[in-house]
Image: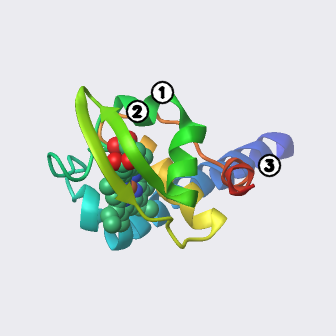
Amino acid sequence: MKKYVFTIAMLTVALQGFSQNATKGKVVYDKVCVACHQATALGIPGAFPPLSKSDYLNKDANRAIKGVVKGLTGAITVNGKKFNSAMPAQALSDQQIADVMTYVYSSWGNNKTVVTTAMVKAQRK
Ligand code: HEC
């Protein structure tokens, strides 16, 4: 019996840990990313690419993280539309980037990738 109580307690802690990440990520999104990618995550045609159901985002998590960590310039195609602009490197901690990317991946029809601080660290090199 004790064993089960312990297991349930651990599961509760793990689940809370996950939902906290996404909640904290939303705070970062609403403060930082929203200015360009918009509350709808649809971006602005010709200027800011969408994060909503973005094929670019869903295809390669490490590439997406790198753009946020180091900035992104030059021509890219997102959902069949060309963008050729610049995203400045985002001055956020590894934890904040892991949280915000986990939130983005868990929202707007994206593929639910969970982004860890280790994945962010790897892109800082
Ligand atoms: C100052 C405006 C600006 C801010 C703030 C900004 N971005 Fe971007 N973002 C852009 C632009 C512009 C591009 C496309 C760059 C290019 O054309 O090469 C882009 C591209 C991207 C891409 C890859 C393309 C796509 O649509 O999938 C991702 C992912 C992304 N941004 C995530 C974020 C996240 C997460 C934040 C908040 C931490 C953020 N951005 C903050 C302007 C911004």
In terms of secondary structure, where does tag 2 sit?
A: helix
Q: In front here: 56 or 38?
A: 56
Residue type at mark 1?
A: Lys
Q: Residue at x 30, y 46 (%)?
A: 84
Q: Is mark 2 within 8 Å of ligand 1?
A: yes
Q: Is residue 106 visible?
A: no
Provide the residue designation for mark 2. Answer: 56
Marks 1 and 2 close (CB-CB < 8 Å): yes
Amino acid type indicated by mark 2: Tyr
Up/down of 32 relative to 115, above or below? below
Residue type for callout 3: Phe
> Badge 1, how many Cα within 10 Å: few under 14, some, many 20+?
few
Query: Does 94 sit left or right of 108 as displayed?
Result: right
| Label 3 vs label 1, nearer the camera | 1
Res. 23 visible in picture: yes
Image marks 2 and 3: residues in contact by CB distance under 8 Å: no
In this rendering, the label closer to the viewer, 2 or 3: 2
Q: Quadrant of the N terminus?
A: top right
- Residue nearest the observer in this picture, 65 or 107: 65
Farthest residue, direction left: 45
In the rendered image, the vertical position of residue 53 relative to residue 22, given as above or below: above
- Ligand 1 appears in which quadrant? bottom left
Q: What separation in Å lies between label 1 and label 2 (alpha carbons)?
A: 5 Å
- The circle on residue 59 is 1
Label 1 sits on a secondary structure element that is helix
- Locate residue 70 relative to residue 107 in the image: left or right: right
Residue 6's tag is: 3
Residue 86 position, x and y percent, is: 37, 57
Query: Residue 124's image quarter?
Result: bottom right
Report the front residue among 69 and 51.
69
Residue drawn 75% across the image and 55% down it: 125
